[in-house]
Image: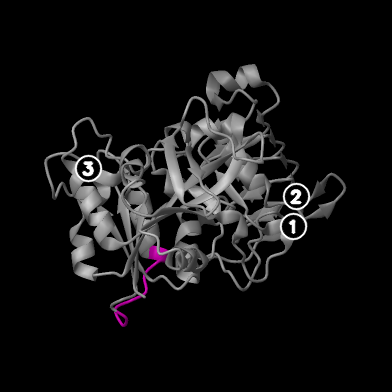
């Protein structure tokens, strides 16, 4: 079966500002060396789906460069590709007006590839999923549309599309971000939420998109308009993500999924990586997480003197990092971070090419790439002072936006 994947990667990610000031949300770095979009692309490729179009729009240059550097299969296999598709206004005079409109404006992609099945997946969540298991469910139920779902707490359910199903998992209702979310029968306090990942029979998708395009007052959105309109017309089923299994993962890792739509959620998902037995296992050789390759040297830790010892504890340290007589604890460091002597980094996410000067102290912070932290600086210790200089969340997380490129220090 030939499956075509359409990855929706055009979101602005306003709740992740200032990390999305200069880039689309799927291009935001994660876990030291990856980008958020690497998760959905790795899931697709690991599941044997190699025909992938990435629909981009909002500040997409960084994302396009990442796809070019890390996700090109080459020209030997014409059915294997990851191709970015910028908004081109092929079907009118407006940019994408919603998720459904984004695909409607690119219906030519279906004509060109003639797939047996279309996977429409989002690009802004952190998770691992064997999509072939969802495809098998779709085929077994003879579904026209399948929605990937998982249970969420009812007090968080108003952030998602909420699905109601019968005993056979056929969808009877789909309401986007309801004020009073329906609870799951037999599971009080839980609602069944859409993950924003769908499988469509191609002709069903085509007809629904064309109809939606001429429907007055439509938001041209899958969750608000297109799928609710299909429920009573074709078989729409809910796939239970909680049943998905990845070879090589333990029970601790099963059904891990995080919506990193806010700064605090993004921070906590990064912190999930630090544990000796992390809930998100990036070290499973059977399900590799792919990304762009950078030819950088290994990380190193130098100086072993009292008060000046290069060390990292309970942390993720990426290639190219130099921890030079400073201490890193409970943190995630991106590529080529330089931590100078006598400095301390705790409970923080530090992105690529950040330089932390001597005697600096940082805690509970997200520092975007290319930032220089001056000698003796303190971040996260005086939040009132930090609010005058940076962005501080309600929980007290300090966020410093991307800095300009600068010459690196030498050891």
Counting labels gives 3
Q: What SS does tag 1 mark?
A: strand
Give residue 102's position: percent from left, percent from top.
26, 47
Q: Give the mark nearer the N terminus: 1 vs 2.
A: 1
* Residue 339 visible from this viewpoint: no
Closest to the observer: 185 or 296?
A: 185
* Residue depicted at x 65% and y 49%: 332
Quarter of the figure with the N terminus: bottom left
34 to 60, vertically: above or below: below
Give residue 339's position: percent from left, percent from top.
66, 47
* Residue depicted at x 49% and y 63%: 134
Task: Tell me if residue 379 is in the magenta stretch.
Answer: no
Q: Are marks 1 and 2 in contact (CB under 8 Å)?
A: yes
Q: Which residues are magenta?
A: 69-77
Q: Give the mark nearer the N terminus: 3 vs 2.
A: 3
Name the residue carrying label 2: 325
* Residue depicted at x 19% and y 68%: 112
* Residue depicted at x 52% and y 49%: 149
Between circles 3 and 2, the one closer to the viewer is 3
Q: Are marks 3 and 1 in contact (CB under 8 Å)?
A: no
Displayed quadrant of residue 289: bottom right
Name the residue carrying label 3: 212
Q: What SS does tag 2 mark?
A: loop
Displayed quadrant of residue 2: bottom left
183 to 319, vertically: above or below: above
Left or right? Give the position of 298 relative to 58: right
Name the residue carrying label 1: 302
Left or right? Give the position of 91 relative to 160: left
């Amino acid at each position: 079966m030939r499956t075509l994947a359409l990855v929706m990667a055009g979101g602005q990610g306003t709740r992740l500002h200032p990390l999305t000031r200069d880039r689309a949300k799927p291009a935001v770095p994660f876990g030291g060396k990856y980008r958020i979009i690497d998760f959905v692309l790795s899931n697709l490729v690991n599941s044997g789906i190699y025909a992938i179009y990435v629909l981009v729009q909002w500040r997409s240059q960084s994302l396009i460069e990442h796809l070019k550097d890390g996700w090109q299969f080459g020209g030997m296999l014409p059915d294997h590709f990851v191709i970015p598709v910028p908004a081109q206004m092929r079907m009118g005079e407006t940019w994408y007006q919603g998720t459904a409109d984004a695909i409607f404006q690119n219906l030519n992609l279906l004509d060109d590839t003639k797939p047996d099945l279309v996977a429409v997946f989002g690009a802004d969540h952190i998770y691992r999923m064997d999509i072939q298991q969802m495809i098998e469910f779709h085929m077994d139920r003879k579904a026209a549309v399948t929605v990937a779902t998982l249970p969420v707490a009812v007090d968080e359910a108003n952030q998602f599309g909420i699905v109601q199903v019968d005993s056979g998992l056929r969808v009877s209702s789909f309401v986007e971000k309801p004020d009073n979310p329906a609870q799951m029968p037999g599971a009080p306090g839980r609602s069944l939420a859409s993950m924003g990942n769908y499988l469509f029979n191609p002709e069903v998708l085509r007809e629904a998109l064309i109809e939606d395009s001429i429907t007055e007052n439509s938001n041209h959105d899958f969750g608000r308009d297109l799928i609710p309109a299909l429920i009573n017309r074709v078989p729409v089923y809910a796939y239970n993500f909680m049943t998905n299994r990845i070879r090589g993962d333990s029970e601790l890792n099963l059904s891990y999924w995080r919506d990193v739509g806010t700064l605090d959620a993004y921070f906590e998902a990064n912190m999930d990586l630090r544990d000796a037995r992390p809930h998100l296992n990036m070290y499973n050789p059977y399900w590799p997480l792919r990304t762009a390759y950078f030819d950088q040297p290994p990380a190193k830790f130098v100086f072993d003197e009292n008060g000046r010892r290069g060390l990292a504890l309970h942390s993720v340290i990426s290639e190219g990092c130099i921890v030079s007589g400073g201490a890193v604890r409970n943190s995630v460091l991106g590529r080529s971070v330089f931590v100078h002597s006598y400095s301390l980094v705790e409970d923080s996410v530090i992105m690529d090419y950040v330089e932390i000067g001597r005697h600096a102290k940082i805690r509970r912070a997200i520092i975007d790439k290319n930032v220089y932290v001056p000698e003796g600086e303190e971040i996260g210790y005086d939040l009132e002072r930090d609010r005058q200089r940076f962005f501080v969340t309600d929980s007290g997380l300090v966020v410093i936006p991307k800095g300009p490129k600068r010459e690196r220090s030498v050891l």
